[in-house]
Image (cartoon, grey):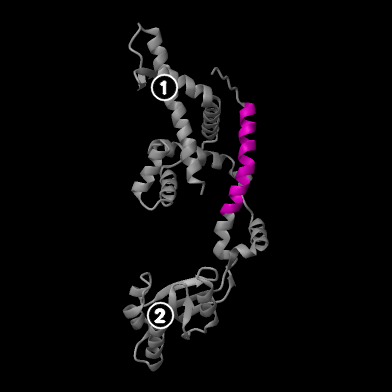
């Protein structure tokens, strides 16, 4: 998925230039009419800033680059129309869902839109243009199964799941408390999860009977990690001291390092390779189409 910041930034730039163009046209109409009160966009200590001066500054600073974007978008849409390419509502909705999924909730998504000065219609317009461009260049960005297999073989480490341990722990402040807890566990007086829920001072796992879930090497402090990975499934450690206090650890499960099979990562690899090809193909395609088009710039 494309970087969300870049997506918003690009659409914001086009929207800004479109707004400037509207304002510029409006100001030109005003110029042809009898003199009227200036269209003021800000006042600073009594001194006004007009819409015309804002538009002039925007055009001077970013006009050429944004105009180029708008020209390219027009070329893409014209090419899609000639090729009979249409983007369905279902495709747009699917892309919107992917974008929204990158945010924790709808409110955060809308906040991002506001931050980049982009509305939903503009964002959908950008999606349509991008999907058109992807379909126009699809023949040159397709991926073979041989390419997928080669990428998988060349990047095996990327598709290796590290060794993991699932463990519970009881955390107390003092060694005396830990010795008492360990004695209760060894005698069978208390079950591990029961005792963890009663006395552990770790708020993150206490309510779950000390369950820490699964973790790989490098995620826990060294003393804790060494003890956890040295235990067999079902074993309980002696007292393990760390900066947090005194721990007693019980290993619930272990998973050895393993490679993810190709069929599980095939789709991900295909997307990676297609994206790589698009980065090479699309600029050349746009350059070629631009050379074939009659473009007259009067900015």
Q: Nearer the viewer, residue 146 or 114?
A: 114
Q: Please identify the quadrant where the C terminus is shown.
A: top right
The image shows residue 203, relative to residue 4, as above or below, that is: below
Q: Residues within 10 Å of mark 1 (few under 14, many from 20)?
A: few
Q: Look at discs 2 and 1 and give the one toward the viewer.
A: 2
Q: Mark number for residue 174?
A: 2
Q: Residues within 10 Å of mark 2 (few under 14, many from 20)?
A: few
Residue for point 40% across, 39% down = 115
Q: Nearer the viewer, residue 83 or 111?
A: 111
Label 2 – label 1 distance at C-alpha:
72 Å
- Residue 133 percent coordinates (x, y): 55, 39
Label 2 residue SS: loop
Disc with the residue nearer the chain's start (2 vs 1): 1
Magenta highlight: main SS: helix
Residue 170 falls left or right of residue 262: left
Label 1 residue SS: helix
Q: Which residues are magenta?
A: 271-292
List the residue tagged with mark 1.
22
190 inside magenta stretch: no
The image shows residue 121, relative to residue 295, as above or below, that is: below
């Amino acid at each position: 998925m494309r970087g969300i910041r870049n997506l918003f930034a690009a659409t914001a730039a086009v929207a800004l230039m479109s707004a400037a163009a509207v304002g510029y046209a409006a100001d030109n109409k005003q110029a042809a009419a009898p003199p009227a009160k200036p269209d003021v966009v800000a006042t600073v200590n009594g001194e006004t800033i007009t819409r015309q001066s804002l538009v002039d500054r925007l055009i001077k600073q970013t006009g050429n680059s944004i105009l180029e974007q708008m020209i390219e978008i027009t070329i893409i849409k014209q090419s899609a129309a000639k090729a009979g390419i249409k983007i369905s509502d279902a495709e747009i909705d699917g892309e919107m869902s992917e974008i929204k999924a990158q945010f924790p909730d709808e409110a955060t998504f809308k906040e991002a839109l506001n931050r980049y000065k982009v509305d939903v219609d503009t964002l959908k317009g950008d999606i349509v243009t991008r999907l058109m461009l992807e379909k126009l260049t699809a023949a040159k960005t397709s991926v073979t199964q041989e390419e997928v297999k080669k990428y998988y073989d060349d990047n095996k480490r990327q598709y290796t799941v590290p060794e993991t341990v699932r463990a519970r722990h009881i955390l107390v402040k003092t060694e005396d408390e830990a010795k008492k807890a360990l004695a209760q566990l060894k005698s069978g007086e208390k079950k591990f999860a029961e005792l963890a829920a009663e006395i552990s001072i770790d708020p993150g796992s206490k309510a779950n009977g000390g369950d820490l879930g699964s973790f790989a090497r490098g995620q826990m402090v060294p003393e804790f990690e060494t003890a956890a990975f040295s235990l067999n499934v079902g074993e309980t450690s002696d007292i393990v001291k760390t900066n947090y206090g005194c721990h007693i650890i019980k290993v619930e499960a272990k998973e050895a390092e393993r490679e993810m099979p190709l069929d599980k990562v095939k789709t991900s690899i295909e997307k990676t390779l297609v994206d790589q090809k698009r980065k090479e193909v699309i600029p050349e395609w746009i350059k070629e189409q631009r050379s074939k088009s009659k473009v007259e710039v009067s900015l």
